[in-house]
Each structure stands twice: as C-alpha cells, then as structure tokens.
Amino acid sequence: MGNSYAGQLKSARFEEALHNSIEASLRCSSVVPRPIFSQLYLDPDQPPFLPEDVKPKVEELDKELVHRYSQNGNLDFSTNQTVNEMEDEEEDEDMSDSSSPPIPYSQKPAPEGSCTTDGFCQAGKDLRLVSLCMEQIDIPAGFLLVGAKSPNLPEHILVCAVDKRFLPDDHGKNALLGFSGNCIGCGERGFRYFTEFSNHINLKLTTQPKKQKHLKYYLVRSSQGVLSKGPLICWKECRSRQSSAASLSAKPNSSVSPSTTPEGGSANGYKSGFTQTDSSVFSPAKSSSAVNLSGTQDPSRNKSVVKPLALSVQLVGKAFAAAPLSLRATDVANGNANGGRNNVLSSTVSRPMPHLTSPSPGSAAGDQASMSSSGPPKKRHRGWSPGSPVPPSGLSVSVPTIRPSARTEPLLSVPVPQSMLTGILQPQPIPAGETVIVPENLLNNSGVRPVILIGYGTLPYFYGNVGDIVVSPLLVNCYKIPQLENKDLDLLGLSSSQLLSVENMILLTIQYLVQLGPDQIPLREEFEQIMLKAMQEFTLRERSLQMSAQCISVSPGQLPWLARLIASVSRDLVHVVVTQNSLAEGISETLRSLNEMKHQQKLPDYVVAICASKIRGNEFCVVVLGQYQSRALAESMLTTSEFLKEISYELITGKVSFLASHFKNTSLGDDLDKLLEKMLQQRGESVIIPFNGDVSECVSSQEAIAMVSTQEPDLDVDTFQIYQPQLTVARKLLSQVCAIADSGNQTLDLGHFSKVDFIVIVPRSEVLVQQTLQRIRQSGVLVDLGLEDNGTAYQRAEKYVVRLDNEIQTKFEVFMRRVKQNPYTLFVLVHDNAHVDLTSAISSSLSHGEPSHGLADRVINCREVLEAFNLLVLQVSSFPYALQTQQSRISSSNEVHWIQFDTVDDAASGDKLYFGLNEYSKSLQWGVTSPLLRCDETFEKMVNTLLERYPRLHSMVIRCYLLIQQYSQALMALTTMDSLRDHSTPETLSIMDDLITSPGKDKNGCGHMLVIRVPSVQLAMLAKERLQEVRDKLGLQYRFEILLGNPASELAVAKHFVTRLKAWRGNEQDDWIPRTYQDLEGLPCIVILTGKDPLGETFPRSLKYCDLRLIDSSYLTRTALEQEVGLACCYVSKEAIQGPIVALDLSEKEHEKANGSENDSDELLIDLDRPQSNSSAVTGTSGSLADNGVSSSSAADKSQKQTPSLNFQAAVHSSVDEGAYPGFTAGETLKQECDSLGNQMASSTTSKLSSLSSVSQAFRWPAHSAKDSKALRAALPRIVILSKAAYCLLSSQKSGNLPSSSSLLPHADVSWLSSLRPLLHKDMNSEEQSLYYRQWTTARQQHADFSNQGETSGSRSFHPRRLLLTGPPQVGKTGSYLQFLRILFRMLIRLLEVDVYDEEEINANHTESSEITQSSNDHWPDIEIFSKMSFDLNVHDPKYRTISPVYTEQLSRVKQEASKETKLEEPKKRETVSMMLTKFAAYNTFHHCEQCHQYMDINPAAQISDSTLHAFTFSSSMLGEEIQLHFIIPKSKENHFVFSKQGKHLESMRLPLVSDKQNLNAVKSPIFTPSSGRHEHGLLNLYHAMEGISHLHLLVVKEYEMPLYRKYWPNHIMLVLPGMFNNAGVGAARFLIKELSYHNLELERNRLEELGVKRQCVWPFIVVMDDSCVLWNMHSVHEQSSQPLEPGCSSKNVSLKSVLQHIEATPKIVHYAILGVQKWNSNLNTRKAKAPFSRCHVRDFILLNIDLTQNVQYDLNRYFCEDVDFNLRTNSSGLLICRFNNFSVMKKHIQVGGQKDFVVKPKIMVSDSLAPIMPLQYVCAPDSEHTLLAAPSQFLLEKFLQHATYKLFPKAIHNFKNPVLAVDCYLNIGLEVAICYVSSRPHSVNVNCEGVFFSGLLLYLCDSFVGADLLKRFRFLKGATLCVICQDRSSLRQTIVRLELEDEWQFRLRDEFQTANSSDDKPLYFLTGRHI
C-alpha cells in the first residue's frame, strides 16, 4: 500500500530473528508481540561510523556519546537527507497521480446510540487537538501520538495513538502493512484495521480509508507542555543521496535536548534556525513545515536532531519559501508576549500576510541545504535552479521560515487562546518583490556568513542557499517600544513611551554602529540605554519648548542623506543602502556584492538597509558583514549547552581535521611530533630534575621518582575556624529565620523543634562534593548538632552531601522520609550554587536534555518540600540573579546578603581582604605595568587570522587548538628550542616560565598552579593529552603535573606527585589522595578546568594564573561571564590591594640582579613575583588547609607581627563598590572565612605581576632583614588572562559605572521585561540589585520558576520557609551556612532552655536548729509537732540579700564587719543557670504547640468579644470604701462563676469543699497571678504545668495594661484592678487579691449554706503565684547510702498540678495560714537533707488561707518586701506558716516587666540633660524650693529609707546588738541595720526583747493599737534616733502628741521632711528626733 521496502533478507539473520520472535511471543503479555519482519526491516541500516580523520582519542572520548545516541536514535550525524514536504492540499491531490475521480466509498452505519459528532469518537469523547493539547495523555510503549485529518473538520486535527511500527521511518520506508491503534478519547485499545478505527473516530470518509491519506502529522509537546501539530508523516519514499556520513533512522516524537532561547524565552520563529536543539525539526527526513521552525516551539520532538548542533542546520535547500502562518499562531499561543530578545511576533502587521503564490504554501520547506535533490523537482518547487551546485554543509545557521514584521499595530500581540492553535490563519500570497535569493557558495566566496539583524518592518523571504545567512532578533525589541504605566514613565523621566519615530530609530542605530569599536559587537543592553537617553532628551526638549515631539522628527525625505551623513564618519565601516520598494532589494544587493567581492576588497562591518517606501513608511534592517562581528553575533545566539554540542559535533564528524593538520607543525614550519621524538631521543633515559635545580639539569627517572622534599615546608595544619564576617552573616540568617517564625502566619513554629538536621545539595561536581564534605568534617558541625558521634562523623558525613545526578531521587526520598518521621527535628535543605541548574523539570523531561536538567527543580520545588512544616530551604548562590525574577519563589525579605565593608580601614585588624570582581575591575586603574586582568593582544591577533581562514568552525575550537599550540611551543622554547621564543605570546611564555622555574628554586618542589578554562569536555581532554605528550617528551613529567578538572570525575594525580604532597603534609594516612583542588596546595601544575559552568570549587592559594582566553562572546550573560572570572576571586593580604607604588623599572637582567643582591640592600624590593628563594612554600597555609581558610597559625599572621607597618600608598581603596558584589572587602578583627579557604587565606603564592617581557612592579617595604622570609609572604590576587571580548566588558569602567558586565542580561534563563528600564547603577548594593531584577526580569519558559505565575505580582506565591544567601564567589558562604546550622541548633536548644535563678540561701548560719523535727520520710507536716516548732524570722531568700536582717537572739551574737562597699553600688547581677524545659513547664506567649493551642486560643477567628466584662463591687474595711473590680471572663470559663438568674450579674466565683474527695483531674484552689509589663514574657500558660487539666487561673492586671494582656491571652480570666492602682506596687495587687477572695469566700459560704453545706466546709485556700515560676521539682531523700556521712537526695521535675494536689492533701490543712515551697538552687540535691518542713518565710508561690488570715493584711502601699512584712504579721498573729522542703520552685530570669523600679524624673522637666537624681534627693524639707519628682510618694519613701541609713540611724549601723525597733511594719532600711519587728496587737507573738537597747525607733503610719504605754516598754540607747512617718503634716503632729514622744525624744523644726512630691501627689511626711 505504497510502502516500498528496501533491504534483502539474509537467511542467518532471518532464522535468528524468527527464533527470537517465537520466544518473545511465548513470554509476551502485551497485545501485539513485535513481528519478526519489523525486527528485520526496522532496525537502523547501520550504526553510524565516525569519519577517519577525527583523531582516535577524540573517538574514544565520544564513544560514549555516539553509543548513547545510536542506542536511542537521538542524534543523527548525517547531513544527507533531502526532504520534499507536502502540505495537506498537495498530499490530497497527489495520492493518485492519475486524474481519475475518487472511488466512492460507503461507510458502515455507526452502532445505535453511539455518538456521530465530528471530532468525537463513537463513545462521545472529544479527540480534537485543541481540546486535548493541555491534557497529559498516557500511551503504551512503542506508540506515538499522531494527528488525523477529518474531511468534515478541515480546521481540526484529531489525536490518535498509533503503533510506530505501522508508520514510516524518516525515509518514507519500512512501515509495516496494516494498522494498530488506540482511541485516546475513550481509551479503547487494539484496533487492528484502519477502516474500523476511522469509523470509531467518526472520520465519515467518502473514499476508502487509508492510513497514508488520513494520518497526517506527528504530534509533539512544546516546552510548556502544549501538545501541537508537528512534522508531516513522510509516507512517500524521500529521495536521498548518500553522503559520507551514514544515516541513523531517527524516530519522531522522541526527544531532543532542550534549548534555551537566546533571549526572551518565547518561541519565535527566528530562533529555529539557530538552535536546532530546540526544535527537533531537523530530523533527517522530516518535514520542516512551519511549526518545525519555531525555535522553542517544541523542544520535545524526540530523537530528531540532525547533528549535535551544527550551528545551523541547513534547513532549507534550493526551495525555501514556506511561511505557513500556523507558526504564528502557535508562537503567540505559546505566550510570546514576554519581551524576549527574539520575541518578534508580538506586534505583527495587520495587512494581509504575504505568502507563496503557489498552491502549496508549505511546499519545499525542508530541503536541507547540504543535499541536492536527485532528479529534477516537481514543477511546484519554485525556488530550484537546475544547475545549482550543492552548497557545502558547513556551520550554517538557518533562517526562519517566518516573516518577521514589526509594525506597531498589534495583530497578534496578545496571547492567542488555545483554540487558535491550528488552522485559523489562512495563508496569503506573497508579492514577488519581497523575496531574497541567497547566492550560492556565499560563505565559500566571501568567507563571511552575514547576520541580518531584524530592524523595523517586514523582513523578506529568503530562498536558495539560506544556510549561509543568519537572522538575529538581537535588537528587534529595542524598536518595539512598550507601553509603560505612568509610574514607570516618571521613574525613567519620560512623558510618554511613544517618543521616537522610525526615522529617529534608524539614525540612532547608525550612530550606534558607527561608534562601535572594531572588536565590539552590538549589545542589546547598550543600545537600549542609548534609546532611553534619546527619549529622555526628547522629553526634556519637549518640556522646554512646549511642543510636541512631532516638530523634531525627521521627515522621510531627509532620512537617506542624514543616514549617509552619519555613516560617512565611520571610515567606510558602516554603509547605508536605501531602496524604494522593499527591504528585499537592499538585502539582495548587499548579498550579491558580498558574493562577488574580491578577497582584497575591504568589507564594511555593517550595512544598514533602509526601505523608504511611500506606501508603507520606512523600514530597515542591518546586515552585519564584519568578519569578527558576524561570527560573534551568530555564536552568541547559542546557549552554552548548544554551542558545546556544536563543538562536540565538529570534533566527532572530523570537521576539525584540516585545523588539526594546520597545527601539526610548529610556527617555524617543523613537524611537531618529529621534533618531540627527536628531543626524546636526545634526552635518552634521563628526565629534567623534579625540583631544586635548573631546567638544564637532568637525572634518571628512578632518581626523579625517589626525590622527596628534604624539609617539611611550612604548610599550615588543618584547622577550621569561622571568621567574623561569617559569624555576622550566620546571625543574619538566623534572625531571618526568627522573623519567619514571628511573622504570625504560622509557617514556622520554632518552639516545636528540639534538633537540627540538614542535607546539602550540590551540582554535579565530584570535587565540589569532596570539598563540601571536607568542610563539614572539619567544622565538626555533625557532632555539634548531635547528629553523629565523634568516631563515626568522618565516614557518615557522606550522607549529608548529595549531588544532583541520577541517584538523587533515591537519596532524596530517604531524606524526605526522615523529614516526615521526625516532626520535632527542624531540617535544613541547603541548595548550594543554586543558580547552576534552573531548568524546569517539565521542560527538561519533554526535551530529554542533559540528564541532570531539571533535577534541582524536581527536588527543591516538589510538593513534599513545599509542604513540610519542619523543613527550611536555604538556597546559596554567588550569582543569584536568575532566582530574583518577577516569578521568584523567594520573598525579597528572605534574602540574606553578605555584609559589606566600605573601606580598607574597616579591616584594619584583619589580615586579609576579599578581592572580588569589583576589585579586579578597579585594579585596572592602578596604573601598574603588569595588571591583574590582562588581555593577550598577540593571541587575539592570531585567533582573528585563523577565524578568517576557517569560517565554518566554532571559534572556541580554533582558540583551543591555538592555545594548545601556544603552551606546547612555550614549553619547548623554555627547555630546548630557543628559536620558538618569538613564536609564543609573551603572556604564555611568562606563565610557563614561572610554572617551570618555581619548583627549581624551591628545596621542596613547591610551585604555582595554572588553571586553563576549557568548557568543552572533548576539547579539554584533547588539550590535556597534547600538553601531557609534549611535557613527557621534554622530560618535565616530574617537574609539574597536568590534570583534567572534569566535574564528572575525581582528581587523578600521578603517584610521585601524591608522594610529594603527602611528604609536605606530614601526617596523612598512607592511603591519602588529593580529592579537592585545595589538597593540591603548592603543587606545580596545570589544571584544565572543563564543564559547562565552574561550580564554585575552591582553589589553593598556590593558584597564580587563570587562563580564560577561551571565554569570549558566547558568554554574554552576567552570570556566565562573572562565574568564569569568579574562579580568581580570593582573600588577599591587605598590602596587595592598597595600590602598589611603582618602585623601579627593572629589565629582566636587572631583575635577576636585584633578587641576587637582596640581602645586601638596605631597602628590600619585593617583586610582586613571589620571592624566588622561598617560592610558594613560604606562603603560609596549605590550600587544603582549613577549608575555611582558616589559618590558625598561618605564617601570614607571623609576618604581620614582624613587619613594621607597611607604608603603601593607599592609591586605591579596596573598598568594594558594592555594586555587583557586596564583598567583604575589608576584614574584621577575625580573618574572613573564605568560602574556600584555600585560595583565600594566604594565597600561598603572590602573583607574578610581571610578564617576562614587561617591566616588573615592586612593593617597597620598610627595611628589615631579608632572611625573615615569612615577612615576604603576602597573599596576592591571581592574574587573569581574558579574551578580548570579556576584557572589554570587565574593563569598561566608563564614568565609574559598574563593570558593564553587570548591565548584561543576568542569566540565560531569564529575559528583560521591557526594553525601557533604568540603568543598573554603580551604587546599588546587592539588595537593591535584587529588587531591580525582581522588577525588570521575568523567567523564561524553561526556567523552574516560570510556573510560579500569578495574575498580579501579589498572587505569586513565595515559599514562606525558603531563604536565599548571596555573597560574592569564594567569600566564605559554606562556612557561614555551617555556622548558621550550629547557631540555629543552639537557639532551638535555648528555646527549650530557660535561665533560672540559682542562688544559695542567705543567712543560713543565723538559723537556730530546732530540736523538734519530723522524720524525713513524712509526706505532710504533723500539726502537733509542727505547731511546736519556732518560727525562723531570718529571711533566706537570696533575692533579699541587700535588705535589713530581722533581729533574732542569734543575730545579736553575729559580729558584723564594717563593709567597705560604697553605698550606691550597682545591684549585683544575680546568678542564673540554664535548665532544659520539661513537659511540665509554664510558658509565655512565644510557645505554641498542638496540645495547648485551644488553651491559648490565638485563633484569629476567635473575636476578643467572645469574652464578657463583669463588674464586681465589695466594701473593704481596710480602705473604708467600696472597691469595684472588673472581671473579663471568656465564654469557655464561665462555668467557674455564678451569675444571677438573668445571667447578667456576676455573683461569685465557685469554690469547692474541703471535704471533696481528692480528684486526680482537679486542683481545688483558684490560682491568682499578678502581672505587670509582661504581657508577652510572663509565664501565664499553665496548660502543661497543670498537665492539661481544668483549673481556675486568674491574671491580675492593672487597668492600663488590660488591652495588651487581653490581646495576648484572650482565653484567660482577667481581674482588672481599679484605675487608682495604676501606679501602685505589688502590695496593692496582693492586698486586693486577698480582699476579693475573702469577700468571695463569704458569698460562697452564704450560697452553699442555703444548699445545706456548713460554712467551714467551703475551701478557704487560694494560690498566689508569681508570673516567673517556670518549673517545679520534688526532692526525695536517698536511703542512707554506704557512706553514711553523705546522705544526698535526688530531684525530679514534677507538674504544678502534682505539687498543688500534694499540698492540698495535707491533713488538717485549714489550720495552716500559709503553705509554700522552697526556692530551687543547684545545691539542694547535694546538701545534707534538711527537715522536710520548715516554719519560715515563704514567697513567690504560696497557698494562702484567706479565712485564717482575715485580719492580717498585705500593706497595699508597698513596693518592696511586702511579703516579708506580711509573713512577719501573720506569724506574730500566732498563725502557722509551713514550707514544704521536699518541693522547690524554679523562677525564670525575665528581663522585662515585673516590679521594676520607676525611672524617677522631675515633674516639670527643665532640660533634657539632667543628672540622675540620687535617692537622698527623694525627700525635702516641707515648702522648700526643691525639685518635685514625678513618682509615687510611697516609692520615694521606701527608696530613700534603703539608702539613708547613715543619716537616719547612725547608731544602728553594723550594730546588730542594738537593732532599730519597728512597730507593726517591716521596712528595708539598709543591709547594715537590723530591724526588730514588734506587733502592737494584743496576744501577738513577739521576739524576746528583754535587755535589748534599741538604737532607733521606726514608726510607720501607726494605727490606734500603738500607744504611749507600748513604747515605754522598750529601752533605747542615748542618742538613738527616731523616725515617725505619717500621711500628712497634721496626723504627724497628732501622732507625736498621742504617743507622748516629746517626753523622751528631742525634735527640731528642721528635722521635719516630706517626700519630694507635689501636693497633688499626696507626699508622705516624716519627723526625725534623738533620744534624750
């Protein structure tokens, strides 16, 4: 049926295949086992063979590649197919060549009830492509999706799945007869006849159904996953002519590597030609109908790349004329509206689309240029001229089949909805004048492949030899000026965005081209700035002239001569061609003249073709003809992956053979190999001495191997140290994590975690993995985080570092399992070098790109990672620009930038400064003769000559071959052939000279490292082999090593060099081998560093040269360029940066002499060349040295100490201008850590700034002995040799802007949002740059963030737990994030720890040992025994160590020394200790967990109004008035209260009964916690302390603080004190708690009495507890241990609930007034067991019996010691106070709130700067002019008394025998005075005062119980002093009279005082007197 089979059966093969087929069918479970004929016929004809002229080694290295591709059919190295494609119409008319009418066909009727709608299957499921294009369709293996056409639905394609064996191969052959297909709609399988299938899918045919006729297209997925129409299925045999390369059959619809569009990620027609990776249209015999051409349109057509990236694919042969418009629709539908570099479609013209006039618009779209058709074409192939020779297949860049048109009336500028994908735009005829026929052999004749830069207007069609031209959309977006919002216009200083006419644009373009240098290429970013400046000028002019811009536009008539005028100054480099009809004329003319040009004639670099058409207005484009410019532009259009594939293709196919043969000879014309052989024979067995000798000395190879260094070089030991900047950055990271936790959106709950675990994900680089492992091991972080033990940490480190390769999936699943299983561990996923692989998983799976593509996206952005609440993602990058787009997943507030230091002085104490990209750019201004950044001009000239000679090869191939030759010749010149010296560039020669001679001058053989960057792996391997061969034949194999730095493999160092490295390092194990570049510290070597990107590997300090001559115009994005130069960044000694002074110009010989006579000269000259005597060994730490460059004893330090200050001129500040690289330019006291320490710390070799041919530069040091070589070791910056293109970008410091590399597109995966945008200016630090990129760049389709789109920027989702750490390359980020993990862990532990007071009890020695004690095993006090114990009046609480002791008889025996302390000493800092919180702790508001979530009720939905406010009034006998308190009661707590019947009025708070059985789930006592100033920090969450049981807890707060407490504790009951107590002290709160509780007790007794309960049965206790009680402990006594002298006790943490329940269970509890526990201190467990119960002071946490203490009140005025005062009153009333010693409470040290001192200020501020007011100024004489203070009078009084002891009670000081008598009160009157407390109440219990003479009397607000008789009982010393304190002056006088004080005491008028308040504040008055 139209299939012609080629190939004969061979009997042996047949039998084998038959056998296999039978066996397979027996085992096979699938529907159709593979037929035997398909095995025989469908296998590829032959495996591809490699052309012989490729070097055998190259073959080896590509074996794997070829093998891989030949297995999958993914690549076809042939270029020999011709494709004649038909579009639909032609297919139809062509099916039968005769003109007979079609045979009528009657279709079987559809089964009843089935669907017959066109486009749907009989089961009613939609099959149309437009509806299925977004669906994920699963198809069985071996099936393909194809499109069928239904005659009734011409505009739709139906989707079917067909077994690919029944479809033709790419030659139109080998389709099996028959059919096997499935229905995609309903899923029905196994249709074995096409007729049956066509009925099922309702094709409704009128002719016999034929698969050849109705299955039209392969269907392919675009990079966004849209299914769309692909190439035609080639049913006819395509004619092909065998060419030298055999062809592979490539199947459609398998995949091709993803390509990244050069800019502006949309699919655009223009790209197709250049990146064939992208559109797999180049499959050998597949059509290149429209869609195929759209570049990014579908990176998913499998297995169909014609060749790995020939720069272009000669897509179109003689007849290239197709511009089917479906392309436009697909393009636009693919979201082409983002302004990319090649987004040409976004404004297409509205006039009819021109098209082919022939009936078959798509006709010969695909003859590949490299083929000729065999035989004459059919007549409809218009573009074919019979006699034309076949254009050679070179490195051609094909042209799009689409006609770009850039008019401003947008036709398709909006994204077209999916339904427009197919068939809506109908082709239109094309006027004949608009086509350009590209001349044959254009490239061969002219040596130039012109690049056409699309300008403004419609580009014509190109026919003929289109492989020899390139169309570039580089500047097209600059001419499409976007509509901007007003705010953006204002930002840019424009009045509107439509300011420039086409004429203006043309003139600007010409002007721009004229000013470009001969070695520059147009840069889009540069031209955009020019356009912007022009528009700003116009705006200014408009504003000043107040007229519209139209007045200043150029008229079309003036345009041609103005254009020529501007071009006339270009010295013939820019030509202008003006035509009238169309651009095609101008372009044709240019190409024709180019083709006919004689080689001697000079070409212009640029031709600007202008079409000044009257009808259509002006249009123009630029044809680039410059040899260098056209090539650079074409190459810069490829992404890195693409050009690397192109290079490997050129090597595999042997295209380089003629270049290789060119380099077989030396520059002198001798055969290189023969020369080397000759030298090898001359040398015989001997080799050049490995070290410590000249190059001319030879030894035998055995000797050479045996040579080991005699002394150990001074290399540093490996220590790991973190430097100050790293600490600072780690802290910034930590504070950002805390900010996330505090943000209130519940995304991170730090209190939840008790452990930190991590994993580091790094790009695919073996060295980087080893380097990270080394840092992890040396930092000890695994042990610090408690993840591993000391012993195992070394081995186990490997599971914490994972590289992004194919195994990551399994390792990552293991990690995620750990994350899920450990909810209390906070995991940190560190994604290091996060900028490296940003491809999205979708686009890479569709395009089958490099295996690692999209892995990072799959891991970092997978759902589990996004949702895991215990996982933080930290992305770390030196070049974060691609992570900072509009679609970024990281919030800008979660970025942490490296710290910046502005001047060298900041680093005064550090010994190293960071030397980064900025410093390199600045160093060019140092005016040094041998700069750090260099461009090798000689080399560039050689390259240019070769580029002209080999126009078809990629320039990197040519550069690489030349570089290999340069190094080879330099080696030969320096050892044997002096004559070659002049043929090596001076740069190369000086580098090699330094490399070879430095080991010779060193006793240990240390030397320098040279890094040569060769991105292509194949080229790098070639370079390594060639250089190794030359080195070995010259006998230098023991002198220096040559290594291949391939990310995919480990370092392989020769054995004898490993031995040498081990000898230097001393203590390594026998099996040690170098695994990182830092391990190579000091080894003389060349590292050929390959791989697409450098991946952040750290180099040792012995790295001296970076050769980046291969990095040229293919690296035109900021990331690509900067990461290459980033290799050289490091930390350097300060003196290296501050700008050297030119000391002397020494020629080489003088140079030698100077070095020789060093020791005599007074003033030492240190050439920047490392001092020869000690070469690099001298320089300090070894590279492997701490990874963090941590040189603990680095020689560099010593040198700092020994050299007198260096007097360099600070000509150049190293201050980084933090533009692009917030660098740590100046060290802090600590050295910086370096990301890589090695290179950093003391770069062990300073760099040789002098090339041999140039003058050397010298530093001048102050005189000192040269023998001290350590002083010479400055770590100097590396020397970087750049290509011209890179050098221009980095050195263009015009007007001090950032190096212009920073204005480039930040990364290949992003595109600019708009061509009008402000400039990234030099003062921007990294935060500002980040915001700039977030505003002005957008992710392309292939970018992993592309899917993070939102309608508005607000709806884009930031991942809340993701952070980004950015810092310049090699600045120390690894050390920083390891330190961050450490401090994060410490912080989590701190969150789980609490600082509690740990203080010994005071006055322990004053305690009388009571004879009466209870047995230590008793759980409760026995009231009989207890009541007989005496009360211990001494205060033991260490908080009160500065208060007046209470007088006891024991105290009178204590001799107190006069203390020498000054009175106003700062209060001593109280001792605290850190304790782990347990599950029974009390918490503040910062604790959140699932269990107490309800209890805290911080649910935002719960309105505060859920709680109700109730007033509660009672009268207080003490205050003599009614008090109104307010309760705030949440709904959930109302059950604790009794309300009136109406439910409105609060009647009482429920109390339990004494007789209630002990309920394990309840405590009886209500808990009151007074709190002030601690709404956040007070420990008011008792949920865990109470073990979650229901309890009654009331917060007692001041009125003004109530809203705050209510906000933080919405679910707590609040008791709000009246406003009059806002300034009161803690005494007032305790007084009111007690008053209220007593009143409530009475109410409850009354209420319950009515229910028959006895009054005394109501529970009379309340708990009063401080808001700082955090943990409770129980201490149990050990049984007497074997050493009876040391009984100890153990303690365990218990809950507050169990403590309360225990105390409440005390027998006869109602007889105790106060019960408490002791205060914890760390000696409680070690001290000898105390009695289990004590009768003494208790505080902080008490059970108070409000019934018994009804008549004992707290002093409501008190601020201090209110509890000592209350305890003394209670005890003197004869009540029992019991302390349980087997329980203790821990009090947290809370720094805020609580009863803190007032800041005492004057009431009326006179000036701000008053001296602090001393306590003695708190009182004054009444009516005096004293400054009045704004503080409560009681507070001033108490403070005054504490400090006025010497004035008030001079006799009492240090005299405990004669205490001061205080009646009814205890006041603190200073540590030196004892107070004897006496109660005036009848029947009170007082201390025995017989025989005591008092040294003073203190009467404080005494009541009527104090009478004259009482005072007369006491005796006073002569001269004792009195202090009487009263509320006002009158009561003071009355008291004096009532107490008859004047009888015994003498008063003077001037002894009356008042507190320094104004009369409004009710001052207190007191009078002092002396005893007569």
Image: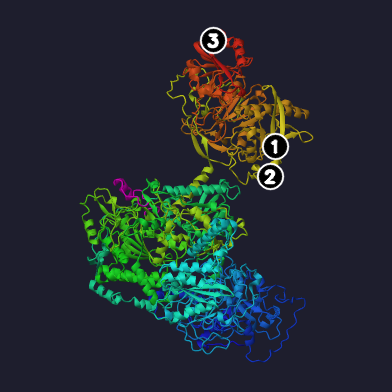
- Considering the whole magenta stretch, tell me its main secondary structure: loop
User: Residue 1079, can we see it?
Assistant: yes
Say which element carries label 1: strand
Which residue position holds label 1? 1529
Q: Disc 3 versus disc 2: distance between alpha carbons?
A: 66 Å
**Image marks 3 and 2: residues in contact by CB distance under 8 Å:** no
Which residue position holds label 2? 1502
User: Residue 1592, can we see it?
Assistant: no
Q: Position of residue 1859 (x, y in %)?
A: 51, 16
Give the quarter of the image for residue 1598: top right
Q: How many numbered marks, from 0 up?
A: 3
Q: Residues within 10 Å of mark 3 (few under 14, many from 20)?
A: some
The amino acid marked with disc number 1 is Ile
Along the viewing direction, whichever of 256 and 770 lies nearer the viewer: 256
The amino acid marked with disc number 3 is Trp
Q: Position of residue 1068 (x, y in %)?
A: 34, 56
Give the quarter of the image for residue 345: bottom right
Say which element carries label 2: loop
Q: Position of residue 383 (x, y in %)?
A: 54, 84
Residue plotted at (30% across, 60% down): 1250
Q: Which mark is residue 987?
A: none
Which residues lie in the magenta part?
A: 1185-1212
Along the viewing direction, whichever of 557 and 172 lies nearer the viewer: 557
Q: Disc 1 versus disc 3: distance between alpha carbons?
A: 56 Å
Q: Quadrant of the N terminus?
A: bottom right
Which residue position holds label 3? 1945
